Image (cartoon, rainbow, N blue to C red):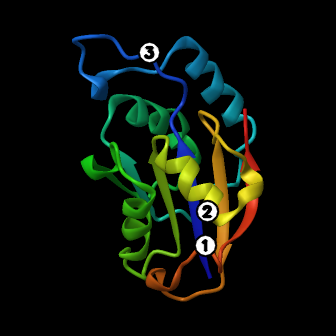
Amino acid sequence: MKKLIIMRHAQAQLEQYGKNDRERTITMAGMHEIDALRQRIHGKLEGVSLVICSNARRTRQTLEGIRPFLPNSADVQFDDSLYHASADSLWHKIQTTTSSHNSIMLVGHNPAVTQLTTAIDASIGAVFPTCGIAIFESNVDKWHEISQHNLRLITLIRV
């Protein structure tokens, strides 16, 4: 059994001309989203052994806000390839994960997060919300066997 957790970063500052997009921080509203999320994720992230997080500042801040709810032993990897990634790139990242990890979490950006989650379950909707988490499970043994057809939505958390 494999568990896939997909998260979109909390609300971030708007893009500003001449400023590096990777350095945008979360807003006060984003901080409130994280606070609200903390009330709803108790026990939901148990067993996560690998977190792959975009290296953008807003995704790192979002992850930091929920870090106490992840196992201390979870391997956290900051990955530049998740920034401006396509849904296909995210699929590749998932499917090339070593099978020793039974539960992984991706922390990324739209539009890829919405495209990926709705490819798995169209009921999620047209836009995956900021600070949203979708938890999927599959009865496969290896990550390369994962597809949109063998994952099922277990929990969708919107704040």
Marks 3/1: CA distance? 32 Å
Which circle marks residue 61 in the picture? none
Q: Secondary structure at mark 2?
A: helix
Location of residue 4 (image quadrant): bottom right
First-in-chain label (1 vs 2): 2
The quarter of the image holding the C terminus is top right
Residue type beneath disc 2: Ala
- Residue displayed at 64% across by 26% down: 33
Marks 2/3: CA distance? 27 Å
Q: Secondary structure at mark 1?
A: loop
Please give the residue where the numbered disc 2 appears in the rendered image.
119
Please give the residue where the numbered disc 3 appears in the rendered image.
14
The quarter of the image holding the N terminus is bottom right
Q: How far across and how far down the image is residue 41, in percent?
A: 70, 45
**Circle 2 or circle 3, nearest the eye:** 2
Q: How far across and how far down the image is residue 134, in percent?
A: 66, 53
* 42 to 9, vertically: above or below: below
First-in-chain label (2 vs 3): 3
Location of residue 57 (image quadrant): top left
Residue type beneath disc 3: Leu
* 85 to 121, vertically: above or below: above
Depth check: give the residue in front, 153 or 2: 153
Left or right side of 127 for 157? right
Which circle marks residue 148 in the picture? 1
